[in-house]
Image: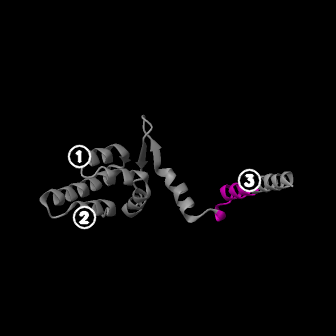
């Protein structure tokens, strides 16, 4: 009796493995079955490059509207890293300079960070408000 249960369990696990593999393969081959987040992530990968040290950098096309650049930025892992650097504003500026390749967007972003920095150090923004402003990024 114990051998029968083990055989049924082994066959069931094998069948489950084959089904999961088959469905995964179908999802990769057919964009209609991929979730919206997966499609967005696939599209966002076109904006990523690696620098000489292997760090991810964002490379935007100049003809892209700023709203699209901001949306890609907010979905990127670089966005979370920048927030973690708070309150090291010089580190944030260096990070932006190193990790974004689009001079126009970079200059607007750095100007925005300077505004948040001024507000934070003048006392008009507390730490949570400053982080929220950085997180929102409204150029």
Mark 2 — residue?
129
User: Of 28 and 131, which appears nearest the observer?
Assistant: 131
Does residue 22 belong to the magenta stretch? yes
> Does residue 139 show up?
no
* Span of residues in magenta: 19-33
Mark 3 — residue?
17
> Which type of secondary structure does the marked residue at label 2 adopt?
helix
Q: Residues within 10 Å of mark 1 (few under 14, many from 20)?
A: some
Whole-angstrom CA distance, mark 1 to mark 2, is 18 Å
Residue at image point 38% right, 64% down: 67
**Where residue 129 sits: x, y (%)?**
24, 64
Nearest to the eye among marks 1 and 2: give it. 2
The reply to whether dot 3 and dot 1 touch (C-beta < 8 Å) is no
User: Of 132 and 103, which appears nearest the observer?
Assistant: 132
Residue at image point 25% right, 55% down: 113
Q: Along the polypeptide, which appears first: circle 1 or circle 2?
A: 1
Q: Along the polypeptide, which appears first: circle 3 or circle 1?
A: 3
The reply to whether dot 3 and dot 2 touch (C-beta < 8 Å) is no
Q: Residue furthest top?
A: 52
Most frequent secondary structure within the magenta stretch: helix
Q: Quadrant location of residue 8?
A: bottom right
**Where residue 24 sits: x, y (%)?**
68, 56
Q: Quadrant location of residue 117?
A: bottom left
Nearest to the eye among marks 3 and 1: give it. 3
């Amino acid at each position: 009796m114990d051998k029968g249960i083990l055989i049924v369990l082994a066959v069931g696990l094998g069948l489950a493995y084959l089904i999961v593999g088959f469905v995964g393969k179908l999802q990769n081959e057919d964009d209609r079955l991929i979730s919206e987040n997966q499609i967005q992530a696939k599209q966002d990968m076109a904006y990523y490059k690696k620098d000489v040290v292997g760090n991810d950098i964002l490379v935007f096309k100049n003809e892209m509207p700023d709203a699209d650049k901001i949306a890609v930025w907010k979905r990127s892992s670089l966005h979370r890293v920048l927030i973690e650097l708070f309150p090291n504003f010089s580190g944030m500026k260096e990070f932006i300079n190193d990790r974004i390749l689009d001079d126009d967007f970079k200059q607007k972003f750095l100007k925005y960070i300077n505004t948040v920095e001024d507000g934070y150090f003048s006392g008009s923004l507390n730490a949570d408000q400053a982080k929220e402003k950085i997180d929102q990024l409204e150029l």
